[in-house]
């Protein structure tokens, strides 16, 4: 299931120009932004304040408690994946660089990217020699194999993704490292020698390197594994190790003397340590970042509305802001089993009639909300192709004539009545439903709003076919973010009909042709061809008008006052916590 | 033997009432209502409260007309009036976008007219509060009178019932019930069902407030002589209840009902604030406050619905206090 995983993208030249016009401090934006004057989006697409100076403690603040867990085998939140690279090394990682360079996967624990064989059913990695755990023992392939095996057991480590469980060729009846400790799992993962690890899949999967970057491949020494309690002291392979684990209060990390820079081309390890304060008040986090009392808001989803108006309204503060676009799409489903959404022309009428700018405002406007979307794939996903099947007029407020034509075609020339469901706890979804209501009423479509509890939204209400048919809920407000930035990571959970079940994200897309196209793309080893496949799938689903794409999510982040090497890692959509140093 | 003197009226005998007080108009005995009205008329503060309430009721009744003349439709977006370019989504212009078209400014993010939403919100608040009070009064009076008048085990049972209801965690229960109640039931749907549900919850659980007072009044009244007199004449209990007791209870019912309404207004606002009240986008004061909290740095959005709730509750309280003073023979 998708959680918060955002990815940034530098695409706002016009917007940047707006902000650049009111630069505080030393003027003149001549030099390439490196250590010149601070501007809006200085850390987006380039590194702000590059430095190699070591020392200092980087202070991070978190509103509320840590979202899931610091155990690399048991976490799904993007900011958690961003931060754990300070103490965990997975087989490969996204390049910690600014701009599009972070799209690339580079070897981390492994010496090189995976080598496919057997048409992509088998993947082989070689681990670097001399990488040590914090207790001095050398990391071997068996430690990586164990890490994946322990994450299999969802009854102990329930929070992480389930890709390895589903795709590797595990032996029948395997229940994971805790319940089947003596099972022979060589059919799934083989370790022919100390430094080689081989993965065997049930069916070919060309994007296996994306799975290899998952934190679940970070090695765990079997002798130190305490299951659900491992998070209390994760054994580090990275430049830092755990010093303090005070749940709900504070996390502290200090340097790991066993980490060897010569085995690690990706990390600079500048600060002497990290300090994360938990359970802060969200507005307080923003205020402290602005004042410089803490360096970063680790959650990285953007400032609260109260701070937003300050940041955007004050040119000095705006110069300290970055506005990444992420790999999340906010959209609304149309349910084809509820009349009149069973008729494609009625769905197209909604596509034409909606006011796109009001959808954008519902989520916070062009900065804090998102970019107007016309496709399923967000632009940061390689393979994104820009197309617009349902142009909403030159002002993006809807093409009412085209909508009315579609209504006549579907036999409802005067409009129709329907119900739109949304998650009651989310004010942005409420605002979206209200926006739909106001926009569609212009062509006679009368919507009734139905707030639904978030906890059971995808399992019992909007995600349950019976409920939807009974209560005639024809539209459901929703959103989705990629687990990682490629077509499979974004599309598979929302357009593959085989993932449909109560609780899943796919509520309405059941197109056998699309399933076939997904299977082909998954096994296509040629990267360029594969990316073209994703775009074709995107177009096919949009042709069916089943999903109304709202906005590609964006966030407004405030740059740290006292940090160096600040840049947005677009693989995550947050600042890169690994690369930052202290002034 | 002397015959009694024939006394002719006006013929040197005892002076008539008229002569005693001079040639003024005939003095009739005043009813409690008339006495109360005279006292109320002298209470300026209570009259001010009453005036505001009358104004509010008129606004609620004539909401569509008022909005047509002075504002925009309450759910209509005006996105051209908010700052989309700068990205803050706050109203352009001063004081939250106040202008002749939008007397109280506009909402951030969608630009809806706050004036018309406050006016329509008056309907919801008044409707629910008054209906809920009626429900409370009906239940409370019935049970209060029965308990006070009949006494004995009936009184004991009803009093314990009142204690139980008063101890009930009303807000929590209301939240839970309103949150899970389906959108169609008993042949009603949408906001009609919602309003009925809120009226039921608020009215049904607030009855002990009236009940206790009426029970106390009934207890004291039944000791009075006119009740004994009626009983000695052979009147049965129902007759006594309706003809002797009830008229004397009108005063406290009126007073405490008026004082109960503001509590109900606040309660409905709280439920709407927490998201389980009236369904959006129908405006309600509590719902507007809930939307406004996020924009607390720009206070105009919170100001108007907050002021509306404050003024309404204050007016009801002042008028209710004035009523109570007017009906109470012991106060000056």
Image (cartoon, rainbow, N blue to C red):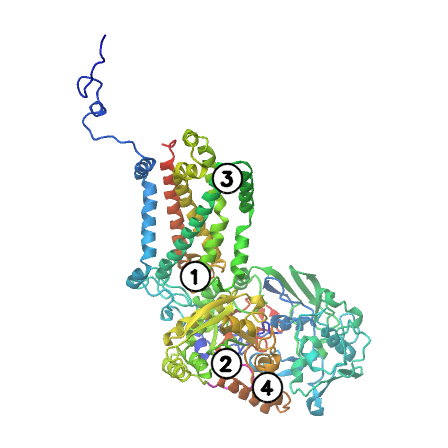
Q: In which quarter of the image is residue A61?
A: bottom right
Of tags 3 and 1, the one toward the viewer is 3
Q: What element carries label 3?
A: helix
Query: Mark 3 and mark 2 in contact (Cβ < 8 Å)?
Result: no
Task: Mark 3: give few (<14), some (14-19) or many (20+) Cα within 10 Å.
Answer: many
Residue situated in front as seen by the camera: A152 or B298: A152
Disc 4: which residue: A515
Give how far across and how far down residue A429 sits, in percent. 49, 69
Q: Which of marks 4 and 2 is nearer the N terminus?
A: 4
Q: Are marks 3 and 1 on the same chain?
A: yes
Give how far across and how far down residue A189 sits, in percent. 76, 82
Magenta segment boundaries in residue numbering: A379-387
Disc 1: which residue: B192
Residue located at (67% from left, 61% from top): A247
| Chain of the residue under the numbered disc 2 shown in the image | A
Residue situated in front as seen by the camera: A394 or B23: B23
Give the CA separation, mark 3 to mark 1: 34 Å
Disc 3: which residue: B147
* Rendered position, A198 above or below B94: below
Q: Are marks 4 and 2 on the same chain?
A: yes
Disc 2: which residue: A546
Q: Do labels 4 and 3 share a chain?
A: no
Q: Which of marks 3 and 1 is nearer the N terminus?
A: 3
* Rendered position, A413 above or below A272: below
Residue located at (71% from left, 66% from top): A231
Q: What element carries label 4?
A: helix
Give the CA separation, mark 1 to mark 2: 32 Å
Q: Do labels 1 and 2 share a chain?
A: no
Query: Mark 4 and mark 1 in contact (Cβ < 8 Å)?
Result: no
In the displayed image of the protein, which residue is found farthest to the left? B11
A385 drawn magenta: yes
């Amino acid at each position: 299931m998708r959680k918060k995983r955002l990815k940034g993208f530098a695409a706002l030249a016009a917007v940047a120009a707006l902000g650049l016009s009111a630069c505080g401090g030393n003027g003149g934006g001549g030099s390439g932004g490196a250590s010149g004057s601070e501007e809006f989006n200085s850390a987006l697409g380039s590194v702000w304040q590059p430095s190699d100076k070591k020392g200092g403690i980087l202070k991070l603040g978190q509103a509320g408690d840590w979202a899931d867990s610091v155990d690399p085998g048991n976490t799904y939140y993007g900011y958690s994946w961003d931060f754990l690279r300070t103490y965990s090394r997975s087989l490969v990682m996204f390049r910690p660089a600014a701009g599009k360079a972070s799209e690339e996967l580079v070897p981390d624990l492994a010496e090189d990217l995976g080598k496919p064989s057997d048409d992509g059913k088998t993947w082989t990695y070689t681990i670097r020699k001399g990488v040590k755990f914090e207790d001095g023992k050398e990391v071997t392939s068996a430690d990586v194999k164990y890490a994946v095996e322990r994450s299999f057991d969802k009854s102990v480590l329930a929070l992480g993704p389930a890709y390895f469980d589903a795709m590797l060729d595990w032996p029948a009846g395997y229940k994971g490292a805790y319940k089947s400790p003596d099972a022979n799992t060589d059919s799934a993962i083989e370790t022919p020698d100390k430094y080689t690890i081989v993965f065997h899949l049930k069916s070919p999967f060309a994007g296996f390197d994306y799975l290899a970057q998952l934190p679940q491949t970070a090695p765990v020494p079997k002798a130190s594994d305490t299951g659900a309690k491992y998070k209390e002291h994760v054994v580090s392979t990275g430049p830092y190790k755990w010093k303090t684990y005070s749940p709900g209060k504070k996390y502290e990390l200090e340097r790991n003397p066993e980490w060897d820079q010569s085995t690690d081309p990706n990390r600079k390890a500048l600060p002497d340590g990290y300090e994360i304060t938990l359970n802060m008040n969200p507005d307080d986090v923003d205020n402290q970042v602005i004042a410089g009392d803490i360096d970063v808001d680790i959650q990285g989803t953007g400032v609260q509305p109260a701070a937003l108006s300050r940041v955007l309204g004050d040119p000095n503060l705006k110069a300290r802001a970055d506005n990444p676009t992420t790999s999340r799409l906010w959209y609304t489903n149309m349910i084809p089993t509820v009349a009149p959404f069973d008729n494609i022309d009625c769905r197209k009428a909604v596509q034409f009639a909606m006011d796109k700018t009001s959808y954008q405002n519902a989520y916070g406007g062009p900065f804090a909300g998102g970019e107007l979307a016309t496709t399923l794939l967000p632009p940061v996903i390689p393979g994104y192709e820009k197309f617009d099947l349902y142009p909403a007029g030159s002002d993006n407020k809807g093409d009412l004539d085209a909508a009315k034509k579609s209504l006549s075609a579907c036999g409802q020339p005067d409009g129709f009545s329907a119900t739109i469901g949304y998650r009651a706890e989310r004010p942005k979804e409420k605002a979206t439903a209200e926006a739909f209501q106001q926009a569609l009423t212009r062509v006679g479509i009368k919507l009734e709003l139905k707030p639904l509890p978030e906890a059971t939204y995808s399992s019992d209400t909007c995600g349950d076919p019976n409920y939807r048919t009974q209560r005639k809920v024809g539209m459901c407000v929703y959103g989705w973010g990629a687990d990682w930035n490629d077509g499979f990571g974004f599309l598979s959970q929302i357009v593959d009909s085989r993932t449909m079940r109560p609780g899943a994200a796919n509520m309405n897309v059941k197109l056998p042709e699309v399933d076939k196209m997904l299977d082909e793309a998954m096994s296509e080893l040629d990267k360029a061809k594969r990316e073209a496949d994703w775009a074709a799938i995107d177009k096919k689903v949009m042709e069916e008008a089943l999903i109304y794409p709202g906005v590609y999510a964006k966030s407004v982040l405030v740059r740290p006052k006292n940090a160096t090497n600040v840049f947005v890692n677009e693989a995550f959509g947050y600042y890169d916590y690994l690369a930052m140093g202290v002034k | 033997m002397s015959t009694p003197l024939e006394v002719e009226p006006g013929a040197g005998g005892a002076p008539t009432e008229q002569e005693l007080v001079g040639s003024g108009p005939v003095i009739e005995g005043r009813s409690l209502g008339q006495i109360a009205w005279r006292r109320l008329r002298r209470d300026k503060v209570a009259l001010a409260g009453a005036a505001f309430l009358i104004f509010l009721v008129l606004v609620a009744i004539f909401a569509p007309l008022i909005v047509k003349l002075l504002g925009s439709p309450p759910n209509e977006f005006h996105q051209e009036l908010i700052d989309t370019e700068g990205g803050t989504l706050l109203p352009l212009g001063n004081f939250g976008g106040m202008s002749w078209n939008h007397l109280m400014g506009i909402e951030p993010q969608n630009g809806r007219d706050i004036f018309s939403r406050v006016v329509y919100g008056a309907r919801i608040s008044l409707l629910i509060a008054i209906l809920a009070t009626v429900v409370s009064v009906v239940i409370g009076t019935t049970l209060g009178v029965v308990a006070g008048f009949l006494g004995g085990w009936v009184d004991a049972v009803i009093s314990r019932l009142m204690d139980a209801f008063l101890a009930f965690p009303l807000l929590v229960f209301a939240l839970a019930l309103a949150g899970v109640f389906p959108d169609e039931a008993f042949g009603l749907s949408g906001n009609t069902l919602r309003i009925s549900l809120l009226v039921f919850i608020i009215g049904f659980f607030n009855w002990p407030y009236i009940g206790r007072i009426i029970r106390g009044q009934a207890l004291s009244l039944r000791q009075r002589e006119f009740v004994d007199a009626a009983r000695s004449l052979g009147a049965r209990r129902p007759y006594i209840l309706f003809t002797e007791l009830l008229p004397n209870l009108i005063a406290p019912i009126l007073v405490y009902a008026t004082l109960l309404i503001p509590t109900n207004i606040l309660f409905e606002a709280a439920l709407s604030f927490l998201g389980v009240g009236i369904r959006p986008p129908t405006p309600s004061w509590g719902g507007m406050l809930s939307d406004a909290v996020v924009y607390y740095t720009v206070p105009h959005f919170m100001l108007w619905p907050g002021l509306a709730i404050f003024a309404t509750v204050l007016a009801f309280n002042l008028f209710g206090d004035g009523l109570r003073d007017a009906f109470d023979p012991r106060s000056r």
